[in-house]
């Protein structure tokens, strides 16, 4: 008879293995049990057992493998006998074969993503693939209206949860540096009232759906990592084929089919929005630092005697290449017609003027984009030297300046980075279909779901779909004990790793 301590450990281990299978299906799309077993280096018997539980919970469904003619799984997880086999149902890389495939019921679970910017509150609902189901902007936030705006946000979130029973998780993207243990943002230049808001107290406590909060650029990195696979957009490449992928990206050096997409495992998301931020995914994991404030690029000084910043430093990057800074530069240039515009609106005006051949301000607009782009380039040099990511993806408001901005960044990088390192780094504009920060907020919620699925299925009794009965906590515990009795641990290589330890908290 296992001890209580060991039983808990095995429960965490079982959860870790369910998570690994979900992550595999998420990255790789429809897969057979044999493919999953090979990729995760587990025995077929172990995979059968894990996937049986996931099927029971309604998290995954059976579906034909690619090329077979059986009917596909519908959005709600049921089978449509009349529909043709659509490529959209299985858009990710799929191997041929005649066995039964398994797929995540991505459309049966929804999340809410909330983006907090200095003056903007935006919330949307998404399915697990990151497809946007709804998106709304709340009224502009000012120093005086923050509390009122947060009350409105809370009400809208509750409305969405009532309206959509499939919502299982809420992710929030907040300006950084975000102190996760305190639940506060340490400094928000140009909008310091945000510092007094405790996001955890305001939103985590009392919510009927679990809430997860992350700094905006780090959330954006998660979105690029997760959804680039879904939408085939990593590195700004759209509509690429599997052949393109093989031509442009070396195969992963693992002894498995395609357990993780190497491109999604090593990337940096460079946020140029109202602030400047960075999220780095290395070997599939977000770099955290001790307090969760690592990679705070916006407050790295590019001029030690430069413009003072509210963080206490001088010459911080975000004083030179954020939307706030760009707006300021436009004002310094005497740019006409921008009085009363928000930072975002001023930038959008600038980018529109820069592409309008008949616009007399075109030359000035291009000069300003070049100037901001060079500063963004100095930041990029630091990203490459500090983190050596495979891909740098530029996103948020300034990325809408397009290739002109990218050219300015690349010029600085060419001038200032060692050639061999530069040549192995791609720099591209984000091409996610939705604003990166609100997508990022959704990615935070989805990552939490994939990492610890039982939390959402059992503890909250929120099983989904017509074939899914609620599984109470007692049922969850019974599964865990069964796993141990059946000696599941003998087949599993993840015993005692950090991942399972974290999930046991
Ligand atoms: Zn600063």
Image (cartoon, rainbow, N blue to C red):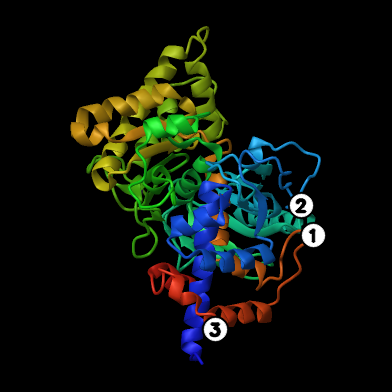
Q: Residue at x 46, y 68 (%)?
A: 182
Q: Position of residue 73 (x, y in %)?
A: 71, 48
- Number of other residues with Cα within 10 Å of mark 3, as a class: few under 14, some 14 to 19, many 20 or more: some
Do we see residue 482 in this rendering?
yes
At numbered mark 3, what does the secondary structure look like: helix, strand or loop? helix
Q: Position of residue 183 (x, y in %)?
A: 49, 65
Tell me, yes or no, whether the two marked residues, 3 and 2, touch with CB atoms within 8 Å: no
Question: According to the image, label 1 marks what residue?
Answer: 466
As measured in the structure, the alpha-carbon distance from the residue carrying label 3 to the one carrying label 2 is 33 Å
Which of the marked residues, 1 or 3, is nearer the chain's N terminus? 1
Q: Nearer the viewer, residue 164 or 81?
A: 81
Q: Nearer the viewer, residue 29 or 138?
A: 29
Q: Nearer the viewer, residue 363 or 328?
A: 363
At numbered mark 1, what does the secondary structure look like: helix, strand or loop? loop
Question: According to the image, label 3 marks what residue?
Answer: 485
Q: Residue at x 30, y 36 (%)?
A: 425
Tell me, yes or no, whether the two marked residues, 2 and 1, touch with CB atoms within 8 Å: yes
Q: Specify the label residue 78 is tagged with.
A: 2
């Amino acid at each position: 008879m296992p001890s209580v301590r060991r039983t808990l450990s095995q429960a965490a281990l079982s959860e870790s293995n369910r998570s690994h299978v979900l992550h595999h299906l998420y990255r790789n799309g429809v897969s057979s049990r044999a493919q999953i077993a090979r990729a995760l280096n587990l025995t077929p018997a172990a995979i059968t057992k894990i996937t049986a539980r996931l099927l029971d919970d309604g998290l995954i469904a059976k579906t034909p493998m690619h090329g077979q003619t059986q009917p596909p799984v519908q959005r709600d997880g049921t089978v449509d006998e009349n529909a043709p086999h659509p490529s959209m149902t299985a858009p990710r890389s799929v191997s041929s074969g005649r066995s039964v495939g398994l797929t995540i019921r991505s459309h049966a679970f929804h999340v809410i993503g909330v983006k907090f910017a200095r003056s903007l509150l935006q919330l949307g609902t998404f399915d697990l693939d990151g497809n946007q189901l709804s998106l709304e902007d709340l009224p502009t936030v000012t120093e005086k209206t923050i509390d009122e705006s947060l009350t409105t946000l809370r009400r809208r979130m509750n409305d969405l949860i009532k309206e959509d029973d499939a919502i299982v998780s809420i992710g929030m993207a907040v300006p950084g540096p975000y102190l996760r243990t305190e639940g506060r943002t340490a400094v928000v230049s140009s909008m310091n009232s945000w510092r007094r808001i405790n996001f955890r107290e305001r939103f985590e406590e009392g919510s009927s759906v679990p809430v997860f909060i992350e700094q905006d650029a780090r959330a954006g990195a998660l979105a690029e990592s997760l959804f680039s696979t879904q939408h085939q957009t990593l590195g700004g490449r759209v509509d690429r084929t599997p052949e393109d992928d093989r031509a442009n990206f070396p195969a992963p050096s693992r002894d498995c089919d395609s357990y993780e997409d190497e491109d999604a495992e090593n990337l940096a998301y460079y946020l140029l929005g109202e602030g400047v931020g960075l999220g780095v995914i290395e070997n599939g994991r977000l770099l955290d630092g001790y307090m969760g404030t690592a990679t705070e690029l916006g407050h790295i000084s590019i001029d030690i005697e430069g413009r003072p910043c509210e963080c206490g430093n001088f010459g911080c990057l975000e004083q030179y290449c954020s939307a706030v800074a760009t707006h300021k530069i436009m004002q310094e240039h005497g740019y006409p017609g921008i009085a009363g515009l928000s930072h975002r609106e001023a930038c959008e005006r600038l980018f529109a003027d820069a592409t309008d051949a008949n616009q007399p301000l075109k030359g000035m607009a291009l000069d300003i984009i070049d100037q901001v782009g060079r500063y963004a380039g100095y930041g990029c040099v630091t990203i490459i030297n500090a983190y050596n990511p495979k891909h740098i993806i530029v996103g948020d408001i300034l990325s809408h300046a397009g290739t002109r901005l990218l050219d300015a960044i690349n010029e600085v990088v060419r001038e200032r980075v060692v050639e061999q390192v530069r040549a192995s780094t791609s720099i591209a504009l984000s091409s996610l279909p939705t604003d990166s920060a609100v997508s990022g907020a959704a990615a935070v919620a989805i990552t939490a779901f994939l990492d610890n699925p039982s939390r959402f299925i059992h503890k909250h009794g929120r099983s989904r779909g017509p074939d899914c009965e609620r599984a109470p906590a007692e049922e969850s515990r019974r599964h865990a004990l069964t796993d141990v009795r059946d000696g599941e641990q003998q087949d599993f290589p993840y015993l005692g790793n950090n991942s399972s330890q974290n999930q046991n908290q």
